[in-house]
Amino acid sequence: MLPAWEPAELPADAVEVGRILDAWGLKGWFKVLPHSASPEALFSSKRWFLQPNERGASPFKGTVLMAIREAKEHGDSVVACPAETIDRDVAESLKGARIFVPRSSFPSTKEDEFYWVDLIGLSVLNREGLALGTVSELMSTGPQTVLVLSQDNPDEPAKPIERMIPFVSAYVDKVDMAARQILVDWQADY
């Protein structure tokens, strides 16, 4: 039997943190594919907002709020159990559901640590004050993270200028969240 999960509005600061992969075990647990190598946001929030998979059937419509009894790491994924008891069939029906949590429920970061979602949209300036673009995404290359910048191209408006800057202390002087900018040791022609 399908629980009566509470219909909900997605919070303004909601961040998609994972997707439900499939049922796990026989007692209503499900397996989650986190969107981060460090899924602390999944563990810190005991209330997940679910939205149905874009394609395919779902046991609910719109956004629902699911209370989580327990979530833990299991290999390269996360397994979770809702507070309301469900069976394996219900857990299987959740396959593909998107999981959101409010950004405000993320664990605090240490000094000089940042969530990727907080860096997207920041302006990047070099030491001379030249604007190099805005962070459009971040890319993990294994040993380091790379800022991917996008900047309007005055010569070809349909083709923005893209730059990639390693997000390491050798090139990043300062991240100023209050000013919404990153100061780097980088030149426009690199």
Image: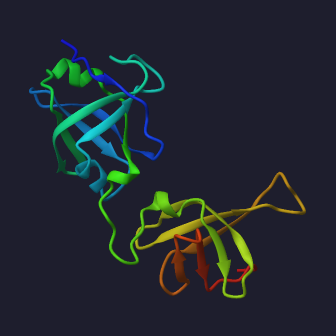
Quick check: can you spot residue 76? no
| Residue 138 in picture, x, y percent from top left | 52, 62
In the orientation shown, which residue stands out farthest toward the left?
27
| Residue 66 in picture, x, y percent from top left | 26, 31
Quick check: can you spot residue 144? yes
Q: Is residue 50 above or below residue 177?
A: above
Image quadrant assignment for residue 53: top left
Tell me: 138 left or right of 59. right
Count of numbered tags: 0
Residue drawn at 52 percent across, 76 percent down = 175
Residue drawn at 33 percent across, 55 percent down = 106
> Which is more toward the observer, 82 or 168?
82
Image quadrant assignment for residue 62: top left
Q: Is residue 137 above or below residue 167?
A: above
Quarter placement of the C terminus: bottom right
| Residue 44 in picture, x, y percent from top left | 24, 52
In the orientation shown, which residue stands out farthest toward the right?
155
Q: Is residue 189 above or below residue 74?
A: below
| Residue 178 in picture, x, y percent from top left | 54, 70
Quarter placement of the N terminus: top left
Question: Colour mode?
Answer: rainbow
Residue drawn at 12 percent across, 24 percent down = 85
Residue drawn at 46 percent across, 61 percent down = 116
Tell me: 188 left or right of 34. right
